[in-house]
Each structure stands twice: as structure tokens, then as C-alpha cells.
Amino acid sequence: MRDGRGKRGRRVVRLVLLTFCAGLLLGIGGFALAYAVTPIPDGAKPAALAQRSVIFYRDGKTVLATQGVNRTRVALDRVPPHVRNAVIAAENRTFYEDQGVSITGTLRAMWSTLTGRQLQGGSTITQQMVRNYYSGLSQERSITRKLKEILIALKVDRSKPKDWVLEQYLNTIYFGRGAHGIQAAAQAYFGKNVGDLSVAEGAYLAAVIQQPSRFADPKGDDLKAVQARWKWVIDSMRQIGALTADQAAAARFPTLTKPKGPLSLTGQKGHMLAQVRAELNRRGYTDEQINQGGLRIVTTFDKELMAAAQRAVESTLPDNTPKKVRTGLAAVDPETGEVLAFYGGKGYQYDNAFSAKVQAASTFKVYALAAALEEGLGLGTRVNGNSPMRVASALIPNSGGTSYGSAIDLVTATRHSVNTAFVDLGQRIGLDKVFQAAQDAGIPADQLEPHKAAATFPLGVASVSAVQQAAGYAVFAAGGVYHETHVIRSVRDASGVTREFTSEGKRVFSPATAADTTYALTQVVQAGTGTAARLSDRPAAGKTGTMDKSSAVWFVGYTPQLSTAVNMFRDDNKPVTIPGYGELYGGSLPAQIWRAFMTEAMAGKPVENFPEPTSYRVWTDPFEDEGEPTPEPTPEVTAPEEPTEEPAPPTQEPEQPADEPQPGDETGRPDGDADIRVPDLFDDDRDGPGGGPGSDERPADPDTPFFGGPTRNP
């Protein structure tokens, strides 16, 4: 009996042992098979390599904005040994001795996964790196994912140096405060580079890894918890020999910098970022590269001038300016085409400087003038300034019906923005020449095409942006050379390769044309419709513009160093009015904003003079014609000598017959087209309706174009 029971017991034991051995062999075989068929993933997760791009102002040092993941990758040799040791002491003391996995830690983590209980983490640095770095591994808590992580960690440990693993780990782990990687964390918590971290600071970052969100800005119990964790890290560093007992005892809990909120991208920064991204896309950079490529982007924007632009607009506009009135400003460097500053409006969904395009009004007349000069005409060329002028079926008046004579020169026509004179000039040289001049100055053809056959085309019926007009006028400041506008100076990629961007100059007008055009525009500022833009310490050239019924008003002007355009308009095309000012015109608030900005922008800059006109002989009596009022004669100017006296404006406003109607709301558009009223700035050189606040009376505006019908052949 006993022998029988003993034999059966031994058989059971053998069976159990055989089953166990078979299971063990099957498990080992299965593990070996799984190990064999589980490859190391080919590549890293895009998010693991992603580095944020930093956008700078033109000085290349002042940060304008950041885009994408806050990570800056660093080589391991840039991380001090005490920082590396702090992380090893906190996360994986046996890192340099183990095979990439911890059996006890793995079993503990699996039990946590099976039971749902949150126990101490068991992943080694290698396992954490594998999970965060390689593609194909998710962050889900499952046995399958954990097994795959272990297999890959074992293979990585055998195929990659330990230092490589540690470098990837330090560059991928999340530290809180939006910081991915040790370099970003050093900046986020202590405002310094990783290479400058102290022992105490490095220990803090190692302590944060366990609970980055909780310890990002600790207070109360969280502060006590992280202090205890930090002390444990310091003690662990002593235990592994990274610190001596004296060094550990001397360590003091570090002071954290105040967390920084995300950079605001509203208002002007939002407008700047939108233009930067748009230009990067045009230059071949994808959104993925911008957000994750670690680019270092230097823009053309001058931080001080951007602030000056905002101050000029917001300090000049009255407090009661209606919200629907929008203002744009753009400033361009004539020598490079760089957009140095702009004002896009208080909102940032749609900007008033780049995107908004409104009819140019009389600021467009400069292209007709340049076209005529290119055709061989001179500033002394006489044109018909009488009002009205009939072209085919269109009857085109000057503002207020004022006639300036049948033979006024181009300087007088420009100074007083005489609509009929520029219509006559366009008919004489051909509207195709005006079209070409505007296109050469950077105005896109598709914005000009719909209007090029209209007799009023020289009067500014085409729509343009503030940036386009600033660039167009910059051509004359640059002596006839056009530079395409741009907002990016350079881009350096994560590998250190830098691309620099410039705009190659293209001569589109002769130096003589540029000089003569500039001379005529200086007369606008000195004694014409733009006297409100005068600068106290230097010469300036510019032109006013007022659309029909003041639906858009402009001032565009320049010094030799800077070209700036200012416009005001409404989306609904209603008159731009401000209580106390009435309907605005180009010589009022736009000119005042321009002056406020340019005064600040030019402060401290050397005074540069414009070139002299190549040849100009003033018609001594430009208003003398069939009984029209005659102003004071202007002095003669003979090239190459500089004029001894500026041509003088009329001493008084030409009289209007009392019973003659005032044309001002004919059928037209900016600066000379019917349906446009332009402020009359001839009354004692005034540039504003009724002189400003307190008067709603609006004088006739010589700066308003009239829109007429078909053209005639010259």
C-alpha cells in the first residue's frame, strides 16, 4: 500500500516538474522567438526629435515668438557630470551596469498594470528612453506594450552605447513647465543653460522627472513633497559616490524662477507671426518644419520701430475714433526692401498693413508723374489744370471745381493734386505707361488690370496695401531702384546651416526720374496738400490721397532712409469720419500719424538731403488762364543749381463764383474721379477740414480723385 502511494506521489512530482520544465522551456522559447522577431524601430518619433523654432527681431537676439515644442537638443558632453549623476541617482542607479531592464522593477510595474494600483515606477532609463524615443511604442499601460518595451530595451542596450542612450533620454524626457529635454528645463526653471546648472539645481530637475506637473510650480504640500524628493536625490548622489558627504551636506534647496506664461501672439505680435509664417511657407518651409524643426528665424522687424508705429497711431487718433475706422502703417527700408515696422490694427485676425487693400487715391499720381518723366517729359511740362475736363463721355472735375489754368507745370499739379492735370498727363503719355510704371514700382498687375483703361486710372482707382505703397515710394528714395519687400532676414536650421535672404535691387526708373519725382513730392510737404507731415529737422517727400467721400484716406512719404505709408479706411466703404473732425482726408490725421512715426524713427539718424532736380523751370504764372485767379509767382529754378527759394503756394484760395455749384460728389473715385470729394488744402495752407476738432465743416479737397468713363487716345 505504502509502496503504491509512494510511486503515485513520485509520478505526480515528476509530472509537475516536467510540466514546469516544459512551460519554462516554452516560455524561454517564446521569449526568444519574440526577441528574435521584435526589431528595434527604424526611426524616432517625430515628437521626440521636435524642437521649437524661435523667431527673433532683426537684432537676432530679442525673441519675438516661439513655435512648437519647447525643446533644444544638446550633446551629452554639454551636460555637466553632476547633472547626469543626479538623473541616474534618481531614476536608475545601476544604469551603467544593468542590461537595459530591471527584473524586479518590471515585475512591479506589471503588477501595477494588472491591478490598476499606482506603485513605484520600475522602468530603467533605457526603457523610458525606448518608450519616449522610438516610433511604434505608445504610452498606453498594457502587458503587450510593456513586453515590447522590454525586448527593445534589451536590444538597444546591446547595440547602442550607454552614453547615447542617456543623451536621448535627457533630450526627450518631459520636465514640466512645457519643457521637453534638459536644456529647455534649465531655461524654464532657472533661466540658464544646462552647462551652468549647479549641483542643487541639477538635483531639482532630476527630482521633477517623477511628477513634472506637480513640481512645476510647487506651493504648500507640493513644495514640501518636492523638497523631500530633492533631498532624497542629493542623498542618493552621495550613496553612489557622485557627491562626498560634505558636498551633500552643503547643498541647499535652489530658488526657482517664476514660471513664464506662453508668449502672447495677439495684436501686433500676431500680425508679425502671421507674416513670418506666410513668407516661410513661400520660401519652401513647411508648417511641420516651422513647428518642430528647431529653426532660428531672424525677421526684419525692428522692435523699437514696431512700438513707435503703434504709439504714432494710437496717440494721434482721438479717443472717440469709431471702432469701424481702421488704420494701417508700413515702413520699408529703401535700400533693402526690408519691412522694418508696421501697424496692423488692434485685432490680429486681419491686418491693415499687408492684407487690407484700398483704393490708392491721389497717392497713385506719383506713378503717372514718373511715367511721364521716363518718357522724356520734364517737371516744366505744361498740362491742363482747368476744371472740368471732358474725356469721351466722362466729365472730370477738380475738387471744388477749382481751375488752375490750362498750362500748369507738373510740380504745381503735384503740389496741389490737380486731378485734371493728371488725367491730361495720362492721356498724353498713354495709360499703358502709367500701368507699367506702377507695376515696376511693385504694384501687382492683377490689382491694376481692372482699371487700366479708365481715364481716371492715374487718379488712384486701383486698390493697394500700405506695404505696397511704402515699397513703391521707396523706389524714389532709392534713386529709382526697386527692392521686393520681405520680412525674413535669415533662417538657421537645427544642424546649424544658415540661409540669408535679401532682395536684389532692380533699376526701374532712371536716377533723374527719381530725383525729379522726389522734388515734386517735397513741394507737397513744404507748400501743398501735405504740410501736416513736415519734419522739423530734415527734408521729406510725400503725397496725400483721399477717396471718394473719404472712404479711404492716405499719406505716403519718405526720407532718404525710410519710406512709410499710412492709410485709414472702413470695411463698409462708408466715409471715414471722427466726431469733431468730420470726414477725414489724407492731409489730416494720416499725415499727422506719418509725422509722429517718422519723427521718432528718424531721431538720432543723420540728416540726408535729396538729390537736386535735374532741370526745372517754373512757369512763372501757372494759374493765369482766361480770367482764373493768379497766385503769387514762384521763383525760377535752373539745374544744376539748387533753388534759392521753394516755389510758393497760392497766398489765398482761388475764388469760386457764388452761384456756381461745388462739384464734390460727382460720379467717380479717388483723387479726381467723380463721386470723390477731396479736402481743399489751399486755404492758408491748411491740411484739415475746418482746421481740426470743433468744426464739422469740410472744405473742398483737391486731393480727391474723380472716376470717369472710357479713355480716349492721346
Image (tube, grey):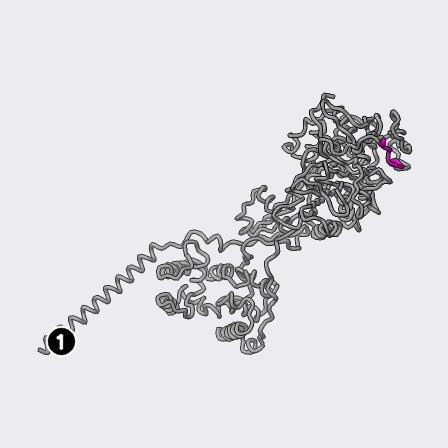
Q: Residue at x 80, y 45 (%)?
A: 695
Can residue 234 be seen from the camera position used here?
no
Q: Residue pushed farthest top? A: 713
Q: Residue pushed farthest front? A: 659
**Is residue 663 magenta-colored?**
no
Around disc 1, counting alpha carbons within 10 Å, would you say few (fewer than 14), some (14 to 19), or many (20 or more)? few
Q: Quadrant of the N terminus?
A: bottom left
Going by the image, does 262 lie left or right of 152? right
Residue 202: x percent and y percent?
55, 68
The residue singled out by tag 1 in the image is 6
Q: In which quarter of the image is the C terminus?
A: top right
Residue 31 or residue 420, whichever sits in front: 420
Residue 463: x percent and y percent?
67, 36
The part of the chain drawn in magenta is: 650-658
Residue 148 to residue 341: above or below: below
Give the amino acid type for the residue marked by disc 1 in the picture.
Answer: Gly
Can residue 317 be seen from the camera position used here?
yes
**Is residue 653 magenta-colored?**
yes
Going by the image, does 58 lie left or right of 256? right
Residue 443 or residue 235, whichever sits in front: 443
Residue 658 or residue 206, whichever sits in front: 658
